[in-house]
Amino acid sequence: QVQLVESGGGLVQAGGSLRLSCVVSGRTFSTSAMGWFRQAPGKEREFVAAISGSTSRTYYTGSAQGRFTISRDNAKNTMYLQMNSLKPEDTAVYYCAPRSTPAARMISADYNYWGQGTQVTVSS
């Protein structure tokens, strides 16, 4: 049974920072690609960032590039998303998700499990 627990969301002013965490249990974390996605009210879930298993190669959507940093600590079965220079348009529920292979993907349908999400709200 795969379990994902996201945390670190909250309310922050524009220009501020947050660090999201995702603790994974029930699967071999170190070889699993991981992704962060987000969903704003009335919108589709969208890709934010991903990190491959084994090599930890990273991928970002354009709006996150240069502001967000995805990382992982395999010893703690935890993935992180450091978000800096936050903007009101970053407001959404953020979800983490693992893949069953080391190869990262940018499409939500390629991920097998989802956490409950953590709310990020950026005020202007």
Image (cartoon, rainbow, N blue to C red):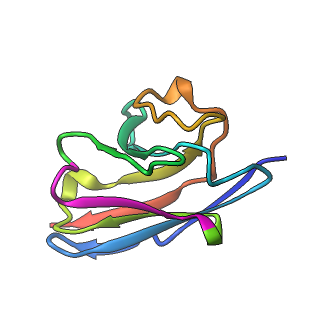
Q: Position of residue 119 (x, y in %)?
A: 46, 60
Residue that extends furthest to the right in the rendered view of this protein:
1
Write the start and end of the magenta stretch as one range. 64-74
> To which quarter of the image does residue 11 belong?
bottom left
On screen, residue 25 versus residue 122, left or right, reads: right
Which residue: 26% across, 59% down? 68
Q: In this orientation, which residue lies closer to the viewer: 33 or 55? A: 55
Which residue: 34% across, 73% down? 18
Q: Position of residue 40 (x, y in %)?
A: 37, 44
Question: Does the magenta run of residues contain 2?
Answer: no
Q: In this orientation, which residue lies closer to the viewer: 31 or 106? A: 31
Q: In this orientation, which residue lies closer to the viewer: 100 or 54? A: 54
On screen, residue 39 versus residue 100, left or right, reads: left
Q: Position of residue 86 (x, y in %)?
A: 20, 64
Question: Does the magenta run of residues contain 70?
Answer: yes
On screen, residue 105 versus residue 88, left or right, reads: right
Q: Position of residue 117 (x, y in %)?
A: 55, 54
On screen, residue 33 versus residue 77, left or right, reads: left
Tally the marks: 0
Q: Quadrant of the C terminus?
A: bottom left
Residue that extends furthest to the front in the rendered view of this protein:
55
